[in-house]
Amino acid sequence: MLKPLITAGLLLVATAGSALAQVPPSQVRAANLARMEAERINGGLSKYFTANCMHRSGGGNCLVNESADGYLFNFLGGAPGWEVNQQPATVQTKILIGPEGNQVKKVIYNGAPQ
């Protein structure tokens, strides 16, 4: 009985590791930079917090496009605790980060959710 559990556990770890390994370092940097820029332009962490997707490796489903121009993120945000407390988002941010993940190319939109 123990052997199938160990095998299943190893398979789960290997699968999770493979999924994490597929996110390129530039995408991880880009997501972190996009999140930090949104926090900065929206008043800092005492006033603003990004959606949970921006706290996943590479931006999760907040990454809407990757091209030679860079990484395009589109995500919601609001007051700290907005998502956990099931409150509506107050800000939507669309931001393009350079392909190396280390330069904000353009804040396309930062305003009321569209």
Image (cartoon, rainbow, N blue to C red):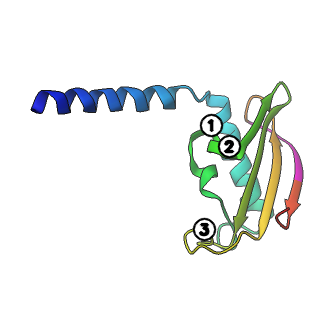
- Mark 2 or mark 3, whichever is nearer to me: 3
Q: How crowded is mark 3: few (under 14 residues within 10 Å), some or many (20 or more)?
A: some
Kindly check if marks 2 and 1 are in contact, taking CB atoms under 8 A apart as contact.
yes
Q: Residues within 10 Å of mark 2 (few under 14, many from 20)?
A: many
| Residue 24: x %, y % from top left | 62, 27
Query: What numbered label is drawn on residue 31?
Result: 2
Whichever of callouts 3 and 1 sits on the residue coming sooner in the sequence is: 1
In terms of secondary structure, what is the magenta stretch mainly?
A: strand
- Mark 3 or mark 1, whichever is nearer to me: 3
Residue drawn 61% across the image and 29% down it? 25
- What is the C-alpha distance between the residues marked 2 and 1? 5 Å
Does 27 sit above or below residue 55? above
Query: What numbered label is drawn on residue 83?
Result: 3
Using the rendered view, name the quadrant where residue 101 is placed: top right
| Residue 50: x %, y % from top left | 67, 60
Q: Residue flagged by tag 3: what amino acid is it?
A: Glu
Would residue 17 appear left or right of 75 to someone viewing this image? left
User: Which stretch appears magenta?
Assistant: 102-108
| Residue 98: x %, y % from top left | 81, 34
Q: Residue flagged by tag 2: what amino acid is it?
A: Ala
Queried whether the magenta region covers residue 89, the answer comes back as no
In this rendered view, identify the residue nearer to me: 102 or 109.
109
Q: Name the residue under label 1.
A: 28
